[in-house]
Image (tube, rainbow, N blue to C red):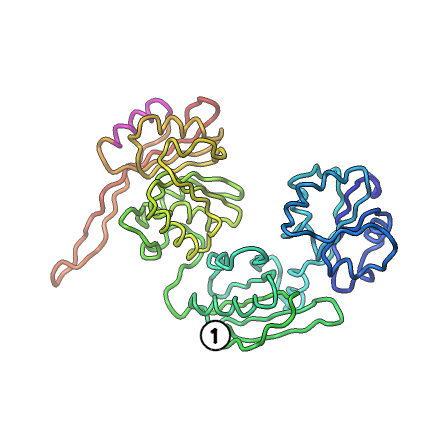
Amino acid sequence: MSIESPWLRIIGIGEDGLDGLSRTARELLDGAEILIGGARHLAMLPEDGRERIEWPSPLQSFVDKIHELRGRKVAVLATGDPMHYGIGATFAKVLPVEEMIVVPAPSAFSLAAARLGWPLAEVRTLTVHGRPLALLAAALYPGARLILLSEGRETPGKVAAFLTGAGFGKSAITVFEHMGGAKEARLDGIAESWAHAPGADFNTVAVQLSAPDRPVTLGTAPGLDDSFFENDGQLTKREVRAATLAALRPGPGQLLWDVGAGSGSIGIEWMRADPLARAIAIEPKAERIARIRRNAETLGTPFLKIVEGQAPDALDGLEEPDAIFLGGGITAPGLLEICWNALKPGGRLVANVVTLEGEAELTEARATLGGELIRIAVSRLEPVGPYHGWRPLMPVTQWICRKQGPGGKG
């Protein structure tokens, strides 16, 4: 395919403007009829009479209409690498890849890593541009290195305050402004004593995380301490939760239904396991929904989707899941059948019960659909007067079943 073929040309550009473009990028830009970009990008181009379109707000309204420009040569200017949290990735979701060509420039992540001497493969890259700062909570680990795309000039101070509030106040912060251009500047400091006034809107934040000054949620392995979840007793306990997540097997892009979510612990830990994992928490009680939202925000999964309603009716119309967890309500008429039918081929269904009636449902399900039944019995050491003894939790019966195909057994 020649570079002239696609009508949509998405061109990454840096602070050095036209001088930093490759020969291919410059040819694609010069051959375009329509120029699209932010005000900052369009200001880099000389006035030559071509039609210009500045990104509207909300941006999605334009993305939805981009196909109306088919048949004309369109150049879209984007900062750095358009496929790394950029407009290229957005357009790739709504247009065939054959209709566009993407020419990336060095991303802010690459530039910051180069300046700091950080191997980029060992850095957690995130964006808080148009996204909640709470996403940081799932990335906090002693010694970890983070590079963040910023929302604006206030972002570095907000990041510093967030880290301090999360127990990582000793973390080192470096802010790069206008990287790659004549106005490039660097600011360094410590989160808890960050005193720099808000600077340039166009900035990138790098963080070298310190050791925490108190117990915090660490890592992405399942089984966070129960104390990290606000709950009313409706909580899958740590040991059982770890075993349940291991059976569910979260992965990139995989969608979980957490049916009867309670405190939201299973869906939250599913999403913490991988930045691209998705989950829907289905819960009928308003007070529990409020807790789920608070837990998701605190634990770094603010994009957990919550559906208020009673299963199975509340499941109607939801996107087909890759995995389903049933932590309660297994005896509801038709629930298990509806969940099984909704599950994608190759998907996993895991159900936990603590009652004889629930065990009867799972025994029948195993006889019909296959899978395996496991009894999980956990005891915790607790004081008994001046001594110590083992106090058992309620045993949990767990059914794990993989769907081989439509109507197939696991």
Span colored in magenta: 358-369
State the quadrant of the C terminus. top left
Task: Look at the picture and state if 327 lies above or below 191.
Answer: above
Question: Which is nearer the eye, 53 or 103?
Answer: 53
Task: Look at the picture and state if 303 lies above or below 366.
Answer: below
Question: Which is nearer the eye, 305 or 2?
Answer: 305
Indicate whether residue 363 is drawn in magenta: yes
Residue placed furthest toward the right = 48
Which residue is pictured at 13% across the width and 58% down the height? Answer: 384
Q: Secondary structure at mark 1?
A: helix
* Mark 1 crowdedness (10 Å alpha carbons): few <14, some 14-19, many ≥20: some
Task: Look at the picture and state if 73 lies above or below 139.
Answer: above
Report x, y in % for residue 329.
30, 35
Indicate whether residue 318 is drawn in magenta: no
* In this rendering, position of residue 116 left or right of residue 262: right
Report x, y in % for residue 143.
50, 66
Which residue is pictured at 50% across the width and 40% down the height? Answer: 254
Report x, y in % for residue 308.
39, 41
Q: Write down the residue under mark 1.
A: 192
Report x, y in % for residue 402.
43, 31
Looking at the rendered structure, the kind of residue marked 1 is Glu
